[in-house]
Image: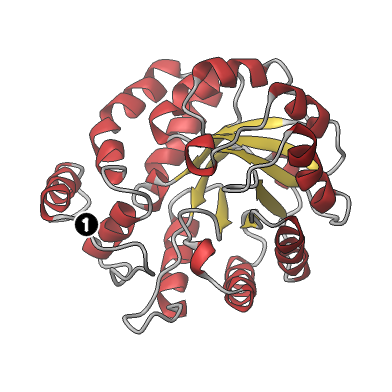
Amino acid sequence: MATDVRNLTGSIVALVTPFKENGEVDFAALDRLVDFHLENGTDGILMLGTTGESCTMTDAEDVAVAQHVVNRVDGAIPIIGGAGSNSTEESLSKAKGLQMVGCDALLLITPYYNKSNEEGIYRHFTNVLDQTEIPSILYNIPGRTGCSISEQNVVRLAAHPNVMGIKEASGSIAYATSVARHLSDDFRMYSGNDDMIVPMLSLGGSGVISVWANVQPQLCHDLVASYLAGDYQKSLRMQLDGLDLVHALFSEVNPIPVKAALAMMGLIEETYRMPLYPMAANTRANLEKVMKEAGLIG
């Protein structure tokens, strides 16, 4: 187990879950992905999040994937497990399972679909935080969930000893700026938007939890590392130069394009679980074009 997760900075990949053609988890491909990240600068791995298609996976599959990744990484970099659910009890059950197999931290999302009120959202998180021992990152992505973590609840939750930070993916600089007022050595902010890494770093962010890093892990690491080292112009240039690829990776709902990209690179089979479905011809053609321009495929 990596021990320095509370001080985690850099590029944390939001890892896809590779599936075989028959729909089962492809553990051989999972090994290839983990090794790819260990060899190419990724600072941490988040598994079983939105990009990992966790909402279509069983609890047993979650635990099996988590155990496999923990064993493969063997403490080299921190591992964060997605324990999100719109059921608080299900989120707690997931969290306990991921803690049991050796994850270093958890990612906890707001209760999507049923949403809840201010106090309910607060208690949705604290119910898990109070009953687990490893630190957690809050996840704010209202475009997916239909609800946001208010600034008031950010302040309340940041005071909890088991909260280490927030993944901010609202796309709102105004919201991120409000959250930034409450950052500290004990409460970090990670960009959840690949097209806003530098702006989030400029607000005091510690890094990114990245879909982009699935295909360009070293570049994403270098982008954050350059900024944190004070080379702001280099970091900005990398951000701007990568926008065409980032936009292509989000030209359809995530993780459809990024799994297509990884399949083009020969790292996984292009297999999804319904309701996700392969890309349309026009968006696929553009993704392939941009991948070639980035030197990722021939």
> In the picture provided, is 172 more to the left or to the right than 107?
left
Location of mark 1 (residue): 279
Residue most toward the bottom? 22
Residue 218 coordinates in the image, percent (x, y) = 40, 45
Query: If the image is split into quadrants, where does the C terminus sit?
Result: bottom left
> In the picture provided, is 107 more to the left or to the right than 248?
right
Q: Residue at x 49, y 53 (%)?
A: 50
Residue 30 coordinates in the image, percent (x, y) = 45, 71
Q: Residue at x 72, y 35 (%)?
A: 117
* Residue 230 at least partly seen: no
Front residue (pair 290, 156): 156
For the image, the number of numbered tags is 1
Crowding near pointer 1: few (<14 within 10 Å), some, many (20+)? Answer: some
Front residue (pair 148, 258): 148
Front residue (pair 119, 194): 119
Q: Is residue 19 above or below residue 261?
A: below
Label 1: state its secondary structure.
loop
Q: Residue at x 39, y 74 (%)?
A: 19
* Residue 176 at least partly seen: yes
| Quadrant in which residue 198 is drawn | top left
Q: Is residue 175 above or below residue 142?
A: above
Type of residue at label 1?
A: Met
Residue 195 coordinates in the image, percent (x, y) = 38, 30
Query: If the image is split into quadrants, where does the N terminus sit?
Result: bottom right
